[in-house]
Image (cartoon, rainbow, N blue to C red):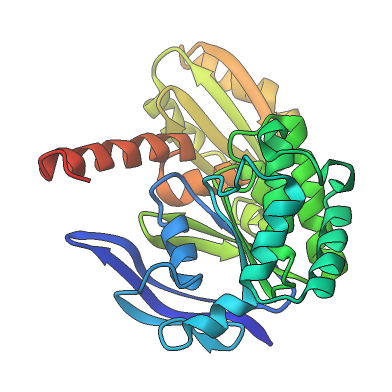
C-alpha cells in the first residue's frame, strides 16, 4: 500500500516553474529522500504534500487523502518538521509538546502518555522541564521531531532536518530517524542536500534538479549506474584533450571533465592509477593530484546534471537574486 501517490504534480509561481510534473509513489513504511540543491523544488514539494501550498496542477494523495479536497484529513495523518525552527523558546520542552498535542485534540491522559513516549524516543526526558531557549541546536531538532510525532502520524515530513548542525550531532539525528522508521514503521519523506545523509538513511532517493526528478532509485542502484571505481585526476592543463584519449581505452567505462579535474569510472581503479599517470605524462600532461573512491551520490548528480550539487546551489541562489531584481526588489 502506498502512503504517498503523486501524478504530474506541478507548482508555478508567476513565470517560475518550481515543481515540474512530478510523478512518484512511496510505499507505507519507506524512508524516501528528496535530494537536491537549494532551489531544486524539494521544500515546495513537501509544502504541497503537507497542504501548505496548493498545487497548480496534478494529483497528490497522502495516507489515502487527496491534498486539495481533504486537507483536514491529510493534516491529521501527518507530522512536519520544518526547515526553519518553529518552537516556542520561552516554553519548556514539555509545554511545547503539550500545546501541540492539544491542537490535535488529544485528551489529558492521552497527551501525557504520548509526550512521555516521544521524549523517550528522542532521549530528552531529562530535559522536559528545561526552557527551549537553553537547548542546543541538536536538542531543538530532536524536540521538533518529537513534536511532529506526538499525535502518532502515519507520515512524517522532515525538511532538511540536520541543516546547520555539526557532523556529530547530525549523525545522532540520523540514528533517531532510522529508529523511527524501522521500529515504529513511520513513513518518512526527507529532504536534504547532504549526499551522505541521503545515502545513509534512505530506502529510495529521488534526485531533484530545477523542479524535476533526474533520477529515482535506491542509493545502491543509483551508484551502480556509474559502474566501478571513480578515479579523479587533477591536471595542470590539457584536460579536454587528455579526456578524449582516455575515453578510447577499453577499461575506462565513463569519463567526464569538471574544470581541470577528470572523473574516470573503471574496475579496480587502484591498480590503474600508475597506468593513468604514465598515460598522461607520455602526452605531456602533468597530474597534480589523484583521488580514488567508490561512486557516490555526488557522482550520480554530476553524471545526470553535469554539475556538482554545490554549483547548483550557487546557480539557484543566482537565479533567485535575478528574479528578486526583476521584480523591483519585491519578495
The picture places residue 55, in percent across and down from the top left corner, at: 35, 74
Res 4 → quadrant: bottom right
The picture places residue 23, in percent across and down from the top left corner, at: 46, 76
Res 206 → quadrant: bottom right
**Nearer-the-camera pick, 124 or 261:** 124
The picture places residue 305, in percent across and down from the top left corner, at: 41, 48
Question: Viewed as shown, does residue 150 lie left or right of 190?
Answer: right
Q: Is 31 drawn above or below residue 317 in the view shown?
A: below
Residue 268 shows in the view: no
Q: Is 196 drawn above or below residue 168 in the view shown?
A: below
Which residue lies at the image location 61% right of the left edge and 78% below the top edge? 76
Which residue lies at the image location 62% right of the left edge and 40% below the top edge? 89
Residue 30 shows in the view: yes
Question: Viewed as shown, does residue 39 lie left or right of 231?
Answer: left
Q: Residue furthest front?
A: 108
**Nearer-the-camera pick, 57 or 280:** 57
**Nearer-the-camera pick, 268 or 167:** 167
Picture mark count? 0
**Nearer-the-camera pick, 8 or 118:** 118
Q: Is 84 drawn above or below residue 59 in the view shown?
A: above
The picture places residue 7, in percent across and down from the top left corner, at: 44, 81
Quadrant of the frame with the N terminus: bottom right
Which residue lies at the image location 44% right of the left edge and 26% below the top edge? 242
Which residue lies at the image location 48% right of the left edge and 43% below the top edge? 302
Q: Is 69 drawn above or below residue 205 in the view shown?
A: below
Amino acid at each position: 500500500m502506498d502512503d504517498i501517490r503523486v501524478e504530474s504534480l506541478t507548482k508555478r509561481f508567476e513565470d517560475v516553474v518550481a515543481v515540474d510534473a512530478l510523478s512518484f509513489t512511496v510505499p507505507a513504511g519507506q524512508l524516501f529522500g528528496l535530494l537536491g540543491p537549494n532551489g531544486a523544488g524539494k521544500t515546495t514539494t513537501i509544502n504541497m504534500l503537507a497542504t501548505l501550498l496548493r498545487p497548480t496542477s496534478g494529483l497528490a494523495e497522502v495516507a489515502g487523502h487527496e491534498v486539495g479536497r481533504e486537507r483536514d484529513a491529510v493534516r491529521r495523518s501527518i507530522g512536519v518538521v520544518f526547515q526553519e525552527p518553529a518552537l516556542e523558546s520561552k516554553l519548556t520542552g514539555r509545554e511545547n509538546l503539550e500545546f501541540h498535542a492539544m491542537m490535535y485534540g488529544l485528551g489529558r491522559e492521552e497527551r501525557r502518555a504520548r509526550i512521555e513516549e516521544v521524549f523517550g524516543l528522542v532521549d530528552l526526558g531529562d530535559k522536559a522541564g528545561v526552557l527551549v531557549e537553553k537547548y542546543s541546536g541538536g536538542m531543538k531538532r530532536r524536540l521538533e521531531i518529537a513534536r511532529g510525532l506526538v499525535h502518532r502520524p502515519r507520515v512524517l515530513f522532515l525538511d532538511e532536518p540536520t541543516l546547520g548542525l555539526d557532523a556529530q550531532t547530525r549523525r545522532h539525528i540520523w540514528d533517531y530517524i532510522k529508529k523511527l522508521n524501522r521500529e515504529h514503521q513511520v513513513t518518512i519523506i526527507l529532504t536534504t542536500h547532504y549526499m551522505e545523509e541521503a545515502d545513509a538513511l534512505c530506502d529510495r532517493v529521488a534526485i531533484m534538479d530545477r523542479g524535476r526528478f533526474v533520477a529515482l532509485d535506491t542509493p545502491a542502484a543509483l551508484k551502480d549506474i556509474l559502474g566501478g571505481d571513480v578515479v579523479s585526476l587533477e591536471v595542470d592543463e590539457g584536460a579536454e584533450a587528455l579526456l578524449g584519449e582516455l575515453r578510447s581505452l577499453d577499461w575506462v567505462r565513463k569519463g567526464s571533465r569538471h574544470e581541470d579535474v577528470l572523473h574516470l569510472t573503471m574496475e579496480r581503479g587502484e591498480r590503474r592509477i600508475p597506468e593513468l599517470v604514465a598515460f598522461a605524462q607520455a602526452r605531456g600532461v602533468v597530474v597534480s593530484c589523484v583521488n580514488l573512491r567508490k561512486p557516490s551520490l555526488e557522482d550520480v548528480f554530476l553524471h545526470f546534471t553535469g554539475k556538482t550539487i554545490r554549483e547548483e546551489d550557487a546557480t539557484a541562489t543566482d537565479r533567485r537574486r535575478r528574479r528578486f531584481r526583476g521584480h523591483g526588489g519585491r519578495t
